[in-house]
Amino acid sequence: MKRRELIKAGGLMLTGSALSRHGFAQESSGLYMPSELCRPTVRLTAGPYFTLDSLQRSDIREDRPGMPLRLTFTVLDDYHCTPVEGAIVDIWHSDANGIYSGVVNQFFDNTTMQFSGEQVDTRDRPTFLRGHQTSDANGKVEFTTIYPGWYSGRLPHIHVRALFPGAAQWSAFVTQLFVPPEMDRLVYAEAPYRERGFYPITLERDLVLRGDADALAKLTIPMTRRANDISGELILAI
C-alpha cells in the first residue's frame, strides 16, 4: 500500500458514526480528501526493549501489581480514513518499578543522563506487560494492563506497534504513547508506585522527546479515572 509522507499529527478519539460523518472532507474542487482528523499518528522509535515474546491476549498484567488501566485503540487507514480490520496491535511497557519483561534493563543516572551501570535481568520472565490483539471490523482492540511506571531518563510511556493485515514486518507502525501528567500525580501517590515517588525527568530531558511538546501533546492518551481503574482511548492512524 502506498503511504503518504509522514506528517506529525496525533490520534483523536472518534466513534464509528463520527468516522462515517467526518472521514472525508470535500474541497472546493469537488474532490474528497481524507479529513484532518485522520492525519498520521506521530511515529517514535521502538526503543531497546521490543521482543518477539508477545502473546495474543487482551489482559497483559500477569502478576504485576498496579492501577488497572483499560486501553482502547482504533486503527485507521490514514489515507482512506477508514477502520482497519485485521491489524495486529502490539503493546509493551514497564511495570510500577520501571522494569520491562524479557530483557536486560539498563538504567541512566538522572543527573548526568549517562548509563549508571545498574541492570535488572528479566529474561527469565519474558511476557509480563506485553501482548497483541487483532483489530475487529471497527478497527478496535482493547487491552487490560496497569498504569505504567517510570524509568530513568524517560517520561512514563507505553510502546505501540501496529501492522496492516498481510504487510511485511519492516513496514510496521511504531510509536510511544504518553500518560497525562495530572493522572501521574494521582497514581504515583498510591501503592505500589509511591515508594519510588514522582519521576525526576522533564520533557526537555526526556531521551526520546527531547523537549518536543507538540509530539507529547499529540501522543498523550486522554484518560478518565473511574472508581477502580483508569480508562483511555486513542486512534492510531497508520
Image: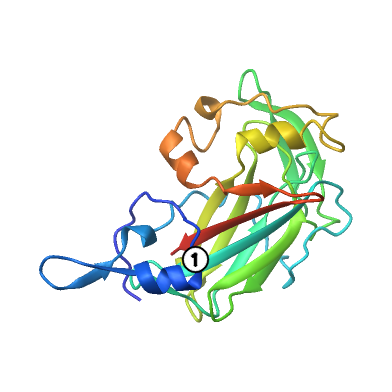
Query: Label 1 is placed on what type of residue?
Result: Ala
> In front here: 65 or 115?
65
Whether residue 132 is visible, yes or no, is yes
Residue 93 percent coordinates (x, y): 69, 50
- Which residue is located at x 78 percent, y 37 percent? 119
In the image as oriented, which residue stretches furthest toward the right? 63
Residue 96 percent coordinates (x, y): 79, 41
- Which residue is located at x 64 percent, y 18 percent? 111
Identify the secondary structure beneath mark 1.
loop
Query: Which picture quadrant has residue 179?
Result: top right
Image-based side of 67 in relation to 139, left or right: right
> What crowding class fits label 1: few (fewer than 14 Cα within 10 Å), some (14-19), or many (20 or more)?
some
Image-based side of 238 in relation to 176, left or right: left
- Which residue is located at x 83 percent, y 35 percent? 190
> In front here: 25 or 200?
25
Q: Quadrant of the C terminus?
A: bottom left
Residue 99, compared with residue 109, is above or below; it is below
Q: Quadrant of the N terminus?
A: bottom left
Residue 84, compared with residue 152, is above or below; it is below
> In front here: 29 or 207?
29
- Which residue is located at x 10 percent, y 69 percent? 29
Residue 232 percent coordinates (x, y): 63, 54
Query: Which picture quadrant has residue 181?
Result: top right
The residue under label 1 is: 172
